Image (cartoon, grey):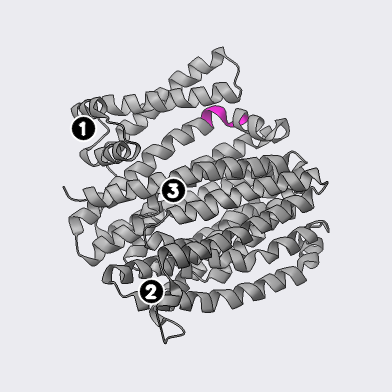
Amino acid sequence: MEGDESLRKIAKGGFIVLLGLVISKLLGYAYRVIVARMGAEQYGLISIGIALLGIATTLSVLGLNQGVLRYVSFYKGKEEFSKIKEILVSSFNLIFPLSLVLAVLLFVFSRWLSVNVFNNEELSLVIKIIAIALPFNSIREVLFNTFKAFQKVQYEVYSKNILENVLKVLLTIIFFILGFKLLGATLAFTLSIILSFILAVYYLEKKVFSVLKFKTSRFLNKELVAYSIPLLFSNFIFSLILWTDTLMIGYFLPEAQVGIYNAAQPTAFLMFMLPYALLILFVPILTELYAKHKKEEFRVVYRTVTKWVFGLNLILLSIFYLFSKDILRILFGDNYVTASSSLIVLGTGYFIGYIASTIQSLLLVIKKTKIILFNTVIMAVGNILLNIFLIPKYGIVGAAIATGFIFTIRSVLLTIESISITKIIPFKLNYIKIVFSILVVSAIVKYVARFYEINIFTLILTIIFMVILYGGLLLVTRSFEREDAVVIKFVEDKIGINFTKVNMVLGRFIK
């Protein structure tokens, strides 16, 4: 059937990346919990430093990471390997010098930023150390997207999701034992990025694509640059959007409030995990289908993956609504429970926003990068204005409202634009059944949870119960379709267990 092989590839890539992301999030949370336990103010300082690194990285990458993903995928399909080297060399030639300049500027002006913008001189050392990681972090973005283009996502999982986070936690613990708290956490963060970069370079040259093997005479690929420049502004502005609330809280409120907010923000950002896993191979595969004019398969893959993002993130959103206070208390401590409202608001905004993640990827595939830039500019201006208005009045909840609102606007704009261009409606009527199922599950769990105390163990058991009950209701309401069975078949092949009875049951409920 149309789209089966493509969906299977996406499921395979998503399965590998999801495992890596689960490990990454667990270790990333361990790092954040360790830092958060030494005080909300210290955690706030690290969060500001990470925010500045994220913005500087996006600026120095110039949008070339997404250009590399598209054009390496394209030339790989044509087996034009010298062109692939040309794309990679062009990216390195542009990114490295710019990232080096920005790192020097961050280092030199670290004290000025700390004193005049954030009113805390202690932040200066954090910025200096994190600035060292900037060139390595920027080049990594190109390396990781090269892995995706070659459909070798496991190497990103090994070097970023696993190695970086393992080192981050271990080095932080070692530095803490030696008596270095804020300094130790910052050093651990920077060193883990540098060592992850070294491993990624090794994988590129030895396992994926030997840059040294092929010759190219061109210093820059003009088509790559023309494609990527709109994405430079789009990605930079989007990075500002993601970090604006953290930076503006740091400007308007004490650093402790930054720390408290950054317990809610990365937790809500789990909404990104499942879409990211599914979209790892979505763009390269959709690009190949687009190039081969396979319109029906293109439509099936696009609509099915959008449905997966919606259905999977819906269970996570319901968990936030039911257990926001418990999650923050268990992970970060009692002092961070005040961020529960922010977690719910951010979770809702991210949920609505990331439904449109496949829609934005579709626009990337058909080279509508200027539309993405237009949407992002609207988001950025709205986010800044809303933060200026809401943070002084409502504190960190105001920052969450601003971010949640602009993500909702983004989703609406992308949906309208994509439908007008492609004439493909990404959503299906059976979304109503999925929503009905999660509402029933949430009502049952809310009632049952009144009879026991929520701790780490009961919370995990409750979430497992929710997932099982949710899956059962999706079957009963016939929310599954034939394309969804592709995922079940892949898992069956991957883990070596025959799901004959599961397949028989699923077959009875598939439309």
Of helix, strand and loop, which one carries label 1? Answer: loop
Q: Residue at point 55% right, 21% down?
A: 458
Q: Are marks 2 and 1 in contact (CB under 8 Å)?
A: no
Image height of 14 relative to 336, above or below: below
Is residue 176 left or right of 398 when viewed as pictured? right
The amino acid beneath tag 2 is Ile
Of helix, strand and loop, which one carries label 2? Answer: helix
Work out whether mark 2 precedes mark 3 in sequence or the reverse, and give the earlier one. Answer: 3
Cα distance between the residues tagged 2 and 3:
24 Å
Of helix, strand and loop, which one carries label 3? Answer: helix
The mark found on residue 17 in the picture is 3
The amino acid beneath tag 3 is Val
Residue, disc 1: 510
Disc 3: CA contacts within 10 A as few (<14), some (14-19) or many (>=20): many
Q: Estimate the x, y position of residue 154 in percent, counting from the top left.
A: 44, 52
Disc 1: CA contacts within 10 A as few (<14), some (14-19) or many (>=20): some
The mark found on residue 204 in the picture is none
Q: Which residues are magenta?
A: 321-325
Q: Estimate the x, y position of residue 386 in percent, counting from the top left.
A: 60, 53
Q: Quadrant of residue 54?
A: bottom right
Residue, disc 2: 84
Labels 2, 1: front one: 2
Q: Estimate the x, y position of residue 206 in percent, counting from the top left.
A: 45, 65
Q: Are marks 2 and 3 in contact (CB under 8 Å)?
A: no
